[in-house]
Image: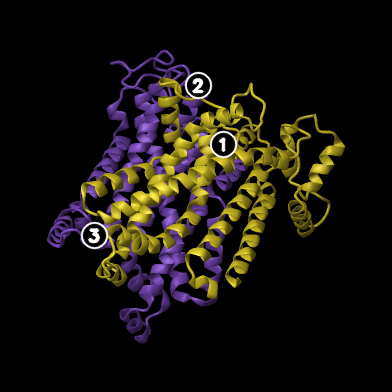
Chain colours: A yellow, B purple
Amino acid sequence: MAFLLRRVVFYLAAFIAAATINFFLPRLMPGDPIQKMFAGAGSDLSLENLNALKLTFGFIDAPIGEQYLAYLKSVFTGDLGRSVRFFPLPVTELLGRALIWTVGLVGTATIIAFTIGTLLGVMAAWRRGTRFDTVISLSAIFSSSVPAVVVSLITLFAFGYTLRWFPNGYAANPMLDPSWGWDYVGSVLYHGTLPMLTMVIVLTGGFAVTMRNNMINLLGEDYIVMGRAKGLSDQGVMLWYAARNALLPTVSALAISLGAVLGGSLVTEVVFNYPGMGNTLYQAILARDYPVIQGALLIMTAAMLTANFVVDLSYVLLDPRLKRA
Amino acid sequence: MTLLTQLLRNKKALVGVTILVIVILVAIFAPLLTEYSPTQRVGRPHQPPSADHLLGTTRLGHDVFTRLLYGARISLAVGFGAGLLITVIGTVLGIIAGYKGGVVDEVITFLTNMVLVIPNLPLLLVLAAFIGQASPLVIAVILGFTSWAWGVRVTRSETLSIRQRDFVKSAEMLGEPGWRIMAFEIFPNLISIVGINFIGSVLFAVITEATLEFLGLGDPNTVSWGIMLYNAQNASALSVGAWWDILTPCFALAVLGLGLALINFAIDEIANPRLRTGGMLARWTGLIRRGEGTL
């Protein structure tokens, strides 16, 4: 429990750090920060609304320390300001809608890629030095080194434009109303296939390499020999003795790579015009909609921290030593 | 020197180094390999590949092949520049944290963990958005100062184990100053970790620079692979069927990425002999397997 508590305190500190970056960035840039932050709104912003926005971002007539506290207060009360591009729309609402799509896409892709990658890594390590291992290792290196932009553009070109098997954009057919009916869900799955495929291609290789290398390092251990001496089957030793122990460092590698996963989804969403966080952030950058850009950093950080916490929880389950500590 | 000879004997490293050398040569000799200028309109828009324009033209009538050659300069410069910065910061902080321990270690580890959980690409996007159109140099600098955390983590944990060895203890007994122990006793033993960190950081910087530029945060007048992607995407190259415009920078990034990743994988194999599977070891495991029957 102490372990989890320490993690929570750490995550809180990390979140405040992200908010601090948001607070100081506009103030460090040359020029008038207020002008810069809200310039995208043009003349639609009434004085009253502008003052409300200024208050949210801590632009008040007070020393910098009080401004900082004012900003932290609005962040922790869930007020991230309003989008200047879609004016009265609150940033939390705009990004909240997008977050659902991203979590769905990233979550599913990570689970699929982690499962496939880990299994391939286990098998490659078990048959190290064979042709199977060479093929898996080389394709894994290739998949983990090619940028997500490149994979998404090539996937889009091959399956979207040339073969025309899948749609080129959107999360669902825009003619359909969202519902739990088969039409809509089917459309979501159909539209999600290419972005999902891209993410799985980008992620699987990294997981496979990590698992393979962890596993090879373990294969010389005494308890592997012991498992064999007990007369366990080949697969029994591979899965329950070697893979089980090699999984621990792989899970902590997963936690570190979550940021990269999020980055990969950001690019994929832009290429496939998928309405998630990445695409929303991209549109906000094009329009220089700073409240949305800053809000996206905070919400993505919060999402990362939550995912890290889930990994911590699974770590406690996987490693019984932590329960006692 | 031994690391270098071992590298050249490894097949993966050989392929990787060959790719890297070709890209470097292309970048240096770009003006000799093409008759066009990368920034001038030299043909009609979106011409398919032909004898005049080996890889076709962009919507603005630039020669794609020429831009590919000159673009390698920026990708390599940003990659190696940012990679060096990331590695230096990561290695120095990692060794100090691992060797000094105590409060220094705790502060550095805390900072490192914090940087690791704040998602990198969104952070870079926010930074770049406030800076405006970022030149390759600015991109390299912000990459360098935001992406060192992974290096600190691995260097620190390796330093922790080296610090316990006898030669470090004896240097301490002899009264060598701390900086000397870190620089001349510990650092040489970290060379493979530093190598992996450097090549990995170069790969990361090349990919991230291209990504930032693709997302419209770069300076559109730069001739680089990321800006090529950005222009091609803006010109809707895929939907008008100008595949050469968009697939050329894709191919270049994929090949350079593969080359760097192969080198990294090879260094890992050399530093950690258990991972080595080619050549002797393969034959040896093969023999054992056959001898033992079904393991």
**Cα–Cα span, label 2 and label 3:** 47 Å
* Separation of residues labelled 1 and 2 (CA atoms): 19 Å
Q: CA distance from mark 1 to mark 3?
A: 41 Å
Tell me which amino acid carries mark 3. Leu
Q: Position of residue B43 (x, y in %)?
A: 39, 14
Question: Which chain does the numbered disc 1 sit on?
Answer: B
- Label 2: which secondary element: loop
Q: Earlier in the sequence, mark 2 or mark 3?
A: 3
Q: Which residue position holds label 2?
A: B235
Residue that appears at 37% across and 81% down: B176
Badge 1 marks a residue whose secondary structure is loop
The residue furthest top is B44
Q: Which residue is mark 3?
A: B3
First along the sequence among labels 1 and 3: 3
Q: Amino acid at mark 1?
A: Gln
Give residue A107's position: percent from left, percent from top: 54, 45
On whether disc 1 and disc 2 are found on a single subunit, the reply is: yes
Q: Are the residues flagged by discs 1 and 3 from a single subunit?
A: yes
A52 vs A33, nearest the viewer: A52
Would you say A231 lies left or right of B279 here? right
The quadrant of the picture occupied by the C terminus of chain B is bottom left
Chain holding disc 3 = B
Q: Residue A80 location in percent, x, y?
A: 73, 46
Q: Number of labelled discs?
A: 3
Find disc 1 in the rendering and name its residue.
B133
Tell me which residue sits at (66%, 45%) in the image. A294
Location of residue A307 in the rendering, given as x and y in whole percent from the top left corner: 57, 53
Q: Residues within 10 Å of mark 3 (few under 14, many from 20)?
A: few
Identify the disc placed on residue A12.
none
